[in-house]
Image: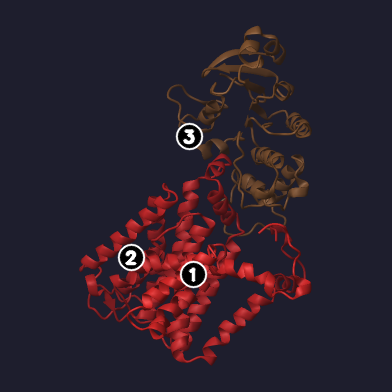
Amino acid sequence: MKVAAGERRAVLGSNGAGKTTLFNTITGDFLPSSGNIKFFGEDITHFPVHERIRRGLRRTYQISQLFGGLSVRDSVFLACRGVSRGRFSLLRPAIDDATMAQAERIIHATHLDHLTDSLVSALSHGEQRQLEIALALAGAPRFILFDEPAAGLSPRERGELVAILNSLPAHIGYIIIEHDLDVALKVSTYVTMMHNGRMFKEGSPEEIEDDPQVQAIYLGGGHG
Amino acid sequence: MSITDIATGPSAVDRFFQQLGAAPVILAVALIIYPLIVPGFFTFQIGGQILILGMIGLSLMVLAGYGGMVSLAQLTVAGIAGYGLAIFGINSVGIMGFGWPWWIAAPMAIALAATAAALIGLISVRTSGIYTIMITLAIATAFYYFVNQNYTLFNGFSGYRGIQPPTLFGLYWRDPLPFYYLCLASAALAYGLVLYGARSSFGLALQATRDNPRRMRAIGYNVTAIKVFAYFLAGLIAGTAGVLYVWFNGRISPGTISVAESIGILVIAVIGGLRHPIGPFLGAAVYVLMKTFAIDLIGAERFNTLIGLVFLAIVFISPDGILGLWQRLKPHLAPTSLRPHHEGRD
């Protein structure tokens, strides 16, 4: 599978098709049993997770993975700090700290301003999903893996999600796993179908939507 | 309070004290005048010991409260500083004792302890939860038996005696008053640094690692390095307390760092509360007072039972320790008009 820089790819497939496993392999949570992974031309197959992240790779999780005991501001600040210097600083960030300013901008871009000082564990499900995306946007990402960002969102929140994804700078590419076809096809330019751990079909959103085999496996309520 | 709330301008000091509130100021004044109104026994034996054990408990609170790592080897780390001081400095046993002056021997002992703590961290960070407790307990036990049986380096069962604090500015630092203030200054410094550092980049990263190590990796952090560095920092605190503890006792032997004593540190941290750095000091106060006076209350045969029952009662009534008790009592102690309305959650 090859994804160009800046490309926006949707990965579809029924439950158990191997979509999240694909993400876990790219980020380094799992080691691949064969093959290798190249990121902007560099072989990262045996890099630890944090080294891949520092090269500009980001991800979100299907089930939110957040810091319940921290505020929204501190969470996004840490995400910005994670790919910059001063991770082990024992000093408190100054008022005019550049990383803190960056965090504020991301909080604003992901529509979380009114929750900046709230404890993460006190956020609603939808707000936590937004924070998932905010953490992935921190610190100049080059490529993001979105794992079902719309899961459990209300129609209004889904609309906001589509707006956020479509307003990302053009140089940021991503792969999005999404069961909501409406969302997936609105935010992607190319679609990969997976089935039983293999790539099954690729094409533009329109081609995939009209493909009879795809409809039989996936769209036709095959995962009910 | 958030990071950006830090005050600027001429009113910074005023704002600082406003945010601080009255309670810490009253506590500080009380701790400073305490030795002037109580007999020497309470200054040295009670006050000094509470502050030292509170510091070792604080080092555990940093690991367990902020990092989610319950280590039973913090007294071992303090003990390594103690043995280090006996070996680098002067002792009366005639074994080792390099004779270095205290201002080299003490910092070296603390550095040795912190390095050892980082090594203990490196071994144990691959585990979590009850397995961290088990592996650090194993390290503490192994170190206890090792020093007990090694005579060339640790002088075995009897350990080292005659380790004296220096005489400085005309003061002998083992006299009750100077020693109490030395302990108070060290404890206050450690407490203040922990409180400050909890909101630093590293402090936040440690708490975030406690909450979700997987996500920490996914935003670019080396989780193992964070945990090992936390062990190192906690080791600096425990090591400092270890030096003070040897000066306090004048000696160090395997008995000082036995498994029972190591568990005592956990008891101190838990009955005090792990949510705030003040907890271990509250825990140490209860622990030291019970250990010292239970025997007078109930006699030599049953005093350990009384101690156990008091600890059990505290943890039973409030799983968050004394801190949790205080949080529950506070609303009821406030004047009626100031009481918050029922918030619908606890």
To the question of a shared chain for discs 1 and 2, the answer is yes
For disc 1, the chain is: B
Determine the colour of chain B: red
Say few, some or many: other residues with alpha carbon within 10 Å of mark 2 (under 14 / 14 to 19 / 20 or more).
many
Q: Which chain is assigned brown?
A: A
Between disc 1 and disc 2, the foreground one is 1
Kindly identify the residue that appears in the image at 76 percent across and 40 percent down: A109
Q: Is mark 2 on a helix, strand or loop?
A: helix
Amino acid type of disc 2?
Answer: Val
Kindly identify the residue that appears in the image at 40 percent across and 71 percent down: B242
Could you tell me residue B202's position as x and y percent?
56, 55
Is there a contact, CB below 8 Å, between mark 1 and mark 3?
Answer: no
Between disc 2 and disc 3, the foreground one is 2
Q: What element carries label 1?
A: helix
Q: Which mark is residue B259?
A: 2
Label 1 vs label 3: CA separation?
A: 50 Å
What number of labels is visible? 3
Label 2 vs label 3: CA separation?
A: 40 Å
In this view, A91 is above or below B55: above
For label 1, the residue is: B313
To the question of a shared chain for discs 2 and 3, the answer is no
For disc 2, the chain is: B
Amino acid type of disc 1?
Answer: Ala
Between disc 1 and disc 3, the foreground one is 1
Viewer can see residue B186:
yes
Amino acid type of disc 3?
Answer: Phe
Q: Which mark is residue B295?
A: none
Viewer can see residue B171:
no
Kindly identify the residue that appears in the image at 65 percent across and 41 percent down: A135
In this view, B204 is above or below A56: below
